[in-house]
Image (cartoon, grey):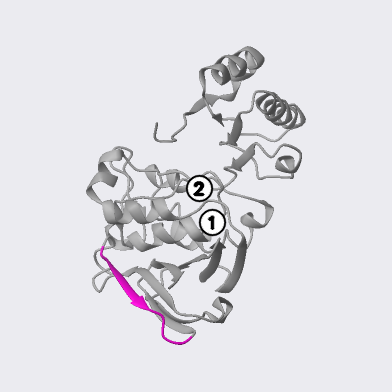
Amino acid sequence: ERGVGIVLWAGYWALDRDMERVMKHYSEMGVKGFKIDFMDRDDQPMVEFYERAASTAAKYHLMCDFHGAFKPSGLSRMYPNVVNYEGVNGLEQVKWSTLEELDQVTYDVQIPFIRMVAGPMDYTQGAMMNSQKRGYRYSNAEPMSQGTRCRQLAMYVVFESPFNMLCDSPTAYEKEMECTEFIATIPTVWDQTVAMDGKVGEYCVIARRAGDVWYVGGMTNWDERELELDLSFLGEGNYKVTAFKDGVNANKIARDYSKTESSLEGRTMKVKMAMGGGFALKIEKR
């Protein structure tokens, strides 16, 4: 009734034992696809499994998201129903990693230049519990992200991910409806992408267009940063900007953010990011 489909998670070993029957059965039930997990290797038998899973899923009009996967290598060109791959140290890593073991903030501004060249990433972003460096601790029961809330919003624009995830619990999103509703507006496929600014391991700013609406996402490493964005690609006309930016207290309280709506004056815009921060913009023609 609401246009929401069901995607099932499946461990690859169990699925592979009876793949044809399982996919046929769930397709007939109306399931839309599988998130297949725990392959965790890239030898020849596993590569063959990927193609077998993709082709069988295509036969039954199911999409595939390969989690626990190696990086993409072109399979989705042959099988467009393969919509995403993990192949990245995604946000789940903070559930069991100390800051000394994993500097996720720096990693986040490396992978758009490196891993993302190969194809989309199932990073599983969207944390509503956020922490600055000095307050971060790993917790399997109550995991928190490294960096600010706006950084998490920016990831939905910066990271290419046709089948995006919400990593947190439903109750976390119920408490943070302003952020949740903004995430829900962000498309997962795009008509145009502009690499606006960046430096590997330091910061990254990407703009993407779907239809007539532009989104801009930016992230920085642990350094505070102020940028002047060149928005000349927008062309003529008047534009409304909805902006989610790090709040004045974000260097201490990572979840602090501000939301503003304004008219775009000129074709440049200054944004300031906190330590481990980010921003997300929605730009609509008036």
**Left or right: where does residue 187 sit relative to residue 42?**
left
x 45%, y 53%: residue = 102
Q: Find residue 175 and report its horizontal and vertical position in percent.
A: 22, 48
Residue that numbered label 2 is attached to: 123
Q: Is residue 71 visible?
A: yes
**Left or right: where does residue 192 sit relative to residue 123?**
right
83 w.r.t. 275: above or below: above
Report the span colored magenta: 256-266
SS under mark 1? loop
What amino acid is labelled 1 in the image? Phe
x 40%, y 73%: residue = 240
Q: Quadrant of residue 70?
A: top right
Camera-nearest label, 2 or 1: 1
Q: Which residue is more in the foreground, 7 or 252? A: 7
Q: Is residue 103 visible?
A: no
Label 2 vs label 1: CA separation?
A: 8 Å
Q: Which residue is more in the foreground, 140 or 272? A: 272
Q: Find residue 81 and report its horizontal and vertical position in percent.
A: 65, 36
Q: Which mark is residue 122?
A: none
Q: Find residue 206 and report its horizontal and vertical position in percent.
A: 54, 67
**Left or right: where does residue 261 sit relative to residue 160?**
left
Q: Find residue 164 and report its horizontal and vertical position in percent.
A: 49, 46
Residue that numbered label 1 is attached to: 159
SS under mark 2? loop
x 52%, y 64%: residue = 109
Residues marked 2 and 1 touching at CB (< 8 Å): yes
